[in-house]
Amino acid sequence: MNAATQASGAPVTETAVFRPDDFKLKNNADEIRVDTNFVSQSFWKEAVIRFRRKKSAVFGLIMILLITLIAIFGPGMNGYTYSGQNLSQKNLAPRVPGIESIGILKGDEKISTTNGTYVVNNYKLKNLSNVYYWFGSDTFGRDIWTRTWSGARVSLIIAVAAAFIDMVIGMSYGLISGYFGGRVDNVMQRILEIANGIPQLVVVTLLLLVLQPGMLTIIFALMLTQWIGMSRIARAEMLKLKEQEFVLASRTLGAGDFFIIFREVLPNIIGPVITQVMFSIPTAIFTEAFLSFVGLGIPVPQCSLGSLISEGFNSFTPHPYQIVPPIIVMSLLMLSFNLVADGLREALDPKLKEM
């Protein structure tokens, strides 16, 4: 700075010159890295990814789809019907074309008597060389393959229909009870406790004794008793969300009560609702099977998995193969729905994201 500039008192401006090596990048990309793939995903896309990572849930879903497809197309895969009888071909062991050449499922059956155990083949004894029953035939000469998958179809329709009807009733009941609170909630919960205090089996049994047995009657009976668990879950979620900011904002803007319940709160609890529905389906399958087992289910000549198990139980000692197919199908259905429900619970619950 020269003397003239200092004397005038004017500000002094200096130009800084930077060289290329004056600054160096920190290279901290690992510290500030953002998962752009995660950021761009929607909630449902992330839920699908998390569900696919759980192998047991994927296995359960594959089994449900496979059993459903066979239940739809299986009864038409051979020339038999679920009600057709042929007493000349009764109690025939399983026999499958092609597989019999390797020594299994060729129609042999072990018979136990007081003189010992011996193997018989009724196909050969009755000269039925061109007759095949893939799961065998029952005591009336009906094809067990066709009856098993027809029964699986009936059980699936009853269970799924009852579960979704219960979802609508229980979800609406619980949301309304939790939203209004106070006296309304108190009265509705007392009604719920009374309904829960009556044994489910008693209600269903009495209803089936009064009404004509059939598919619609069983669905109606299950509908009256299966909604309690769903209503409690919906009420708990409503109590947790009804004081949140988005609900208060909607109420401030003049939204009605039912608009807030079904348009604001309901989409935020759809995860627990779907999970509860998936858990309730195997319960409905088991309940229907039990009713059919004790003779209160589907009337003959129709069949369900429960009625097939009941018929096979009566012939279990001489012909144990007759009870095996419906038991395996029902067990796989219940196990698969529980596996899928468990996978959905983890996939739809953000709290389990890091577990």
Image: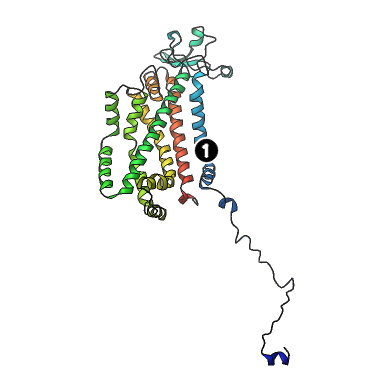
Q: Amino acid at mark 1?
A: Val
Residue 284 horizontal/vertical position (percent): 38, 32
In the depicted structure, whether residue 224 falls above or below residue 214: below
Name the quarter where the N terminus is drawn.
bottom right
In the depicted structure, whether residue 90 falls above or below residue 32: above
Q: Tag 1: Cα neighbours inside 10 Å, few (<14), some, or many (≥20)?
A: some
Spot the residue most to the top: 127
User: SS class of the residue under badge 1?
Assistant: helix
In the depicted structure, whether residue 126 falls above or below residue 194: above
Residue 149 horizontal/vertical position (percent): 46, 23
The number of numbered discs placed on residues in the rendered structure image is: 1
Residue 31 horizontal/vertical position (percent): 60, 61
Q: Residue, x 43% and y 20% (percent of image)?
A: 322
Near-viewer residue (170 or 154)? 170
> To which residue does mark 1 refer?
58
Residue 269 horizontal/vertical position (percent): 42, 46
Is residue 131 something that shows in the picture? yes
